[in-house]
Amino acid sequence: MKLINRTTQCFLLATIFSLSLLSAVALAGPPLICHSFEIDGANSLPWISHDWNLSGSENYDTSKLASDTIAILDSSNVTLVHMETLRRATLYARKDPLAAKQLITRLIARAEASKSATPTAPPTALAVFDAGYLAEAYKQWLGSENNPAQRFDGYALVQLALQRRGSDPQMEFAAALISVGNASINGQEHAEEAIAGAKNDSLLARNLSARFLGAQSETLSAMITRTKMAAKADKE
């Protein structure tokens, strides 16, 4: 029964999300939240659920959310690990407003510190990415009220991270997902780069081929491609 309730909640939120963005793209759920990313067993925040959402049986101490999340992010150079860790962090953050604020505040400060890096301490693109991706995840899951990331342009930070990172198909995938359902962002190039890069990235390829929300839903590749085609049609 809990599983049905959580899935229903995701579909209802997807409807609100779609209408609020005035998007022509039909969503099955907030794209940064309602699907867990495959990370090959890499270290991330605690997860006992067999679904995309928390099971309700977690006993994780959210007062440690900011420190635990940053420690995990600092230990990995794989963008998909960052995406899944920040997805889980957003789910935990919704249960604890103080922890939510602490996490985004520390990630923004971490990103700002990276911007002022010196030649001996080069800028860390992933630090900028983390702040931007979490801001967009918060907007999809925490809404506009009591959202400590509401004033931040997360997508702009992700774009900056891409400029600093260079070629990273996984980060392009993240940017493409952010563009899904957002009429103000053209994710066409992000989708193309992600799909092309998956030819040499088996982890990304598996994530692109995964079904978004259940066996009857579309693949993530189809989702970002559909968004790409819609943007192209609007431009023409």
Image (spheres, rainbow, N blue to C red):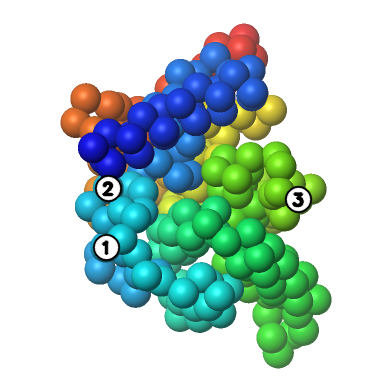
User: Secondary structure under badge 3?
Assistant: loop
**Which residue appears at 51% of the width and 39% of the height?**
176
The type of residue carrying mark 2 is Asp
Q: Nearer the viewer, residue 57 or 229?
A: 57
Residue 232 image offset from top left, x and y in percent? 56, 18
Q: Earlier in the sequence, mark 2 or mark 3?
A: 2
Cα–Cα gap, marks 2 and 3: 29 Å
Relative to 170, 93 lies left or right: right
Q: Residues within 10 Å of mark 1 (few under 14, many from 20)?
A: few
Cα–Cα gap, marks 1 and 3: 31 Å
The type of residue carrying mark 1 is Ile
**Which residue appears at 52% of the width and 57% of the height?**
95
Relative to 207, 25 lies left or right: right
Q: Which residue is mark 3?
A: 152
Q: Earlier in the sequence, mark 1 or mark 3?
A: 1
Q: Nearer the viewer, residue 95 or 219?
A: 95
Relative to 51, 160 lies left or right: right
Q: Nearer the viewer, residue 169 or 100?
A: 100
User: Secondary structure under badge 2?
Assistant: loop
**Is 105 above or below relative to 3?**
below
Residue 197 image offset from top left, x and y in percent? 39, 48
Q: Quadrant of the N terminus?
A: top left
User: Secondary structure under badge 1?
Assistant: loop
Whether residue 56 is visible, yes or no, is yes
Q: Which residue is mark 2?
A: 51
Residue 182 image offset from top left, x and y in percent? 61, 29
Q: Which residue is mark 1?
A: 48
Q: Residues within 10 Å of mark 2 (few under 14, many from 20)?
A: some
Q: Which mark is residue 149?
A: none
Disc 1 vs disc 3: which is toward the camera? 1
Q: Nearer the viewer, residue 205 or 147?
A: 147
